[in-house]
Amino acid sequence: MRVCIIGAGAGGRSASGRIRQMEKQAQIDVFSTQDEIGYAPCEPPFVLRGVARWEDIFYSGNFFEERNINVHLSTEVTDILKKEKRIVAGGQSYSYDKLLLSPGAIPSVPPIAGLDGKNEFTFSTNIADGKALGKIIPKYTSAAVIGAGAIGIELTMALVARGYDNVYLLDMMENILPASLDQDMAGEVEKAMQQKGIELLLPARIRSIKSDSGRKRVTLTDRELVVDFVLLTTGAKPNVELAQKGGIEIGETGGVLVNQYLQTSDPDIYAAGDCLENWDMITGSKTRRLMVTTASKTGDVAAINMISGNSNPYEGTLMTFVIEIFGHQIGTVGFTERLAREKGLDAVSVTVSRPTLRPHLGGKTLHYKLIANRRAGTLIGAQVISEEVIRGTLNQLALAIAEKIPLQRLASLDTPYSPAVGRDPIKDGVKKLIRKLD
């Protein structure tokens, strides 16, 4: 079997490894426009922060070489010829039995007046973007970061760590992490960011961004900011140009349309990672999910189906997310209350703040919000913030949402307790939700 994979990120890497595991004799060719691969794509902000080096974030060993996978670096695939079952890459032709599209996403920059490319930077999973910023950051002391999502926040923290005098974080929405947190939960973390000297401008209406005497002038409706450079972290969009050119169908959200086996409109072509149109596990509605964990998972699922003949359906995404911000761990899963209402669900929510342990034993406060579907009596979303590790709590909530466990069942589970360990912190919120539903 001959398999071609377009993209060597998390999706392509995961898929190629699974294919080799299942099909020892397969010829596998992976194509990447990047000069370097094999690094953890979430970690460049930590290098920019100064807590890691570029060489630290590369995976140990040579993943592709050890598995006899042919990697073509700095090689752009320019054509997909479906009828002939071949692609054109770097001016050469490669035939395939199965093809995987996993080219990732590209930065999405809004049409802000005055943008001229001078001291304006975007950020992607391409390590070249991180290295370019690594050369720029030491030269300056002020910046405006446009976009308060995860990448924008992580880069803002990197600037603070590097001693910047003025750091502004702007977003058109009313709170940080608007895709994951409701406004009533974001405030706790926003306070911690402000205490570190970050000026949050939420919501911000940007009229223009212009160059002025070697600096950048950001004009808002009510004030002006003058900074050394601007970081545009305003999201990303699926990289589907090649798929469109090759006649592959695109979905309503702008990603490559796939079925439950991650098979595209061509039965011999599959898709994985940021380029595909995803769907949520709660309602089945179409969505985008541009996360490394999702890319890795979909790459694995697509590979199994390419080799086994569609035996492993993909269930969709729970939209799980986690980030650390100045000592606070923030984890979310499922819908925000705002998004649930936008989808027409009768959403009911409660917020709870309680220590994980008794104060005299050193417990830190756990802030969380639970969102339920009144009609179904099940959880559809959760948001958790704490200065302690939240992974176990978040995993518990993710399982409850994925399996649509009734609230009454969650409240009655037999969970352990010890003064030194604490008890299940979620039960209080579940019981509050049940009372609110009645």
Image (cartoon, rainbow, N blue to C red):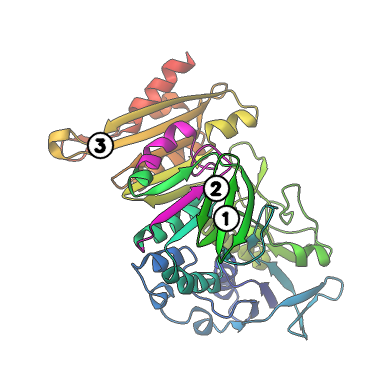
What residue is drawn where x is 34% and y is 46%?
328
Of the residues shown, which amino acid type is indicated by label 1?
Arg
Vertical arrangement, residue 45 with respect to residue 113, above or below = below
Q: Which residue is tagged 2?
A: 224
What residue is drawn where x is 56% and y is 31%?
338
x and y percentages locating residue 35 in the rendered image:
58, 80
- Answer whether residue 169 is magenta in the image: yes
Q: CA distance from mark 2 to mark 3?
A: 43 Å
x and y percentages locating residue 99 in the rendered image:
72, 70
In contact (CB < 8 Å): disc 1 and disc 3? no
Q: Which residue is tagged 1?
A: 217
Q: CA distance from mark 2 to mark 1?
A: 7 Å
x and y percentages locating residue 365 in the rendered image:
27, 36
Between label 2 and label 3, give the one nearer the viewer: 2
Rendered image quadrant of residue 27: bottom right
User: Which class describes the residues within 10 Å of circle 1: few (<14), some (14-19), or many (20+)?
Assistant: many
Nearest to the observer: residue 355 or residue 436: 355
In contact (CB < 8 Å): disc 2 and disc 1? yes
Of the residues shown, which amino acid type is indicated by label 2?
Glu
Residue 73 seen in render: yes
Please tell me which of labels 2 and 1 falls first in the chain.
Answer: 1
Q: Which residue is tagged 3?
A: 356
x and y percentages locating residue 1 in the rendered image:
69, 78
Vertical arrangement, residue 115 with respect to residue 340, above or below = below
Dot 2: element: strand
Which residues lie in the magenta part?
A: 162-191
User: Which class describes the residues within 10 Å of circle 3: few (<14), some (14-19), or many (20+)?
Assistant: many
Of the residues shown, which amino acid type is indicated by label 3?
Thr
